[in-house]
């Protein structure tokens, strides 16, 4: 039974390894994207001192669950923001762009964290699967094979003893018939 489960476990392990790599690559892409966005606005650092950060707040983060190789992983659906009312006339013109930028950066940051969490969950499952594969390959399957070999030898010995006993009985019967 263990031998039949081994290919399935190996396939699961390789699928998990691939998904961990995908999640890590996507998280790194998002990280780079965030760094690029921030670097584009570095020349506006003085203006950010005027920006009212309380205008934008995260209201909710909607996540779904996707099953990958038997592991429940998070998937980001949407990020809901709450924007406070502000006067377009009393605030600088770039405030609207600032709100959009903060929303985009927040969305990228949250998605990045979701991918890191996904990567952690998948990597943990991969490690457990690798342990199970190693247990089967190095301990259980060789143990079962050794036990089967011993049982076969025992049965062969029993068969040989049985045949020998039959020959002895037959020889004695022939001797008794010859004497009689």
Image (cartoon, rainbow, N blue to C red):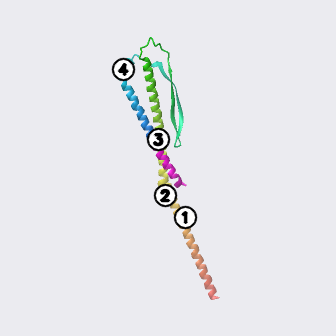
Apparent side of residue 64 relative to residue 38 in the rendered image (left or right): right
In magenta, the rendered stretch is: 1-19
- In three-dimensional space, the C-alpha distance between marks 2 and 3, rounded to whole angstroms, equals 31 Å
Q: Considering only order in the chain, which callout, 1 or 2, is on the residue closer to the N terminus?
A: 2
Q: Is residue 141 above or below residue 31?
A: below
| Pointer 2 residue | 142
Residue drawn 50% across the image and 53% down it: 136
Q: How many neighbours does mark 2 have within 10 angstroms: few (below 14), some (14-19), or many (20 or more)?
A: few
Q: Is residue 175 left or right of residue 88?
A: right
> Quarter-wise, where is residue 65 in the image?
top right
The reply to whether callout 4 and callout 2 are in contact (CB within 8 Å) is no
Q: Which residue is mark 3?
A: 19
Crowd rating for badge 3 (residues with CA inside 10 Å; few <14, some 14–19, many 20+): some
**Outermost top residue:** 90
Q: Nearer the viewer, mark 2 or mark 3?
A: 3
Disc 2 and disc 1: Cα gap in Å? 14 Å
Q: Which of the two discs, 4 and 1, labels the residue nearer the N terminus? A: 4
Q: Element under label 3?
A: helix
Residue located beneath label 4 in the image: 44
Residue at position x 45%, y 26% in the image:
106
């Amino acid at each position: 039974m263990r031998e039949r489960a081994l290919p399935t476990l190996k396939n699961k392990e390789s699928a998990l390894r691939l998904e961990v790599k995908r999640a890590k690559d996507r998280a790194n892409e998002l990280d780079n994207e965030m760094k690029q966005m921030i670097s584009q606005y570095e020349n506006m650092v003085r203006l950010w001192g005027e920006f009212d950060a309380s205008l934008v707040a995260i209201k909710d983060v909607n996540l779904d669950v996707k099953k990958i190789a038997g592991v429940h992983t998070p998937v980001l659906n949407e990020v809901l923001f709450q924007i406070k009312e502000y006067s377009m006339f009393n605030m600088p013109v770039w405030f609207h762009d600032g709100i959009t930028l903060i929303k985009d950066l927040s969305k990228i940051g949250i998605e990045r964290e979701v991918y890191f969490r996904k990567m952690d969950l998948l990597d943990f499952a991969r490690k457990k699967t690798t342990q199970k594969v190693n247990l089967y390959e190095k301990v259980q399957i060789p143990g079962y094979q050794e036990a089967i070999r011993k049982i076969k030898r025992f049965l062969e010995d029993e068969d040989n003893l049985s045949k020998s006993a039959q020959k002895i009985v037959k020889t004695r019967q022939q001797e008794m018939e010859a004497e009689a």
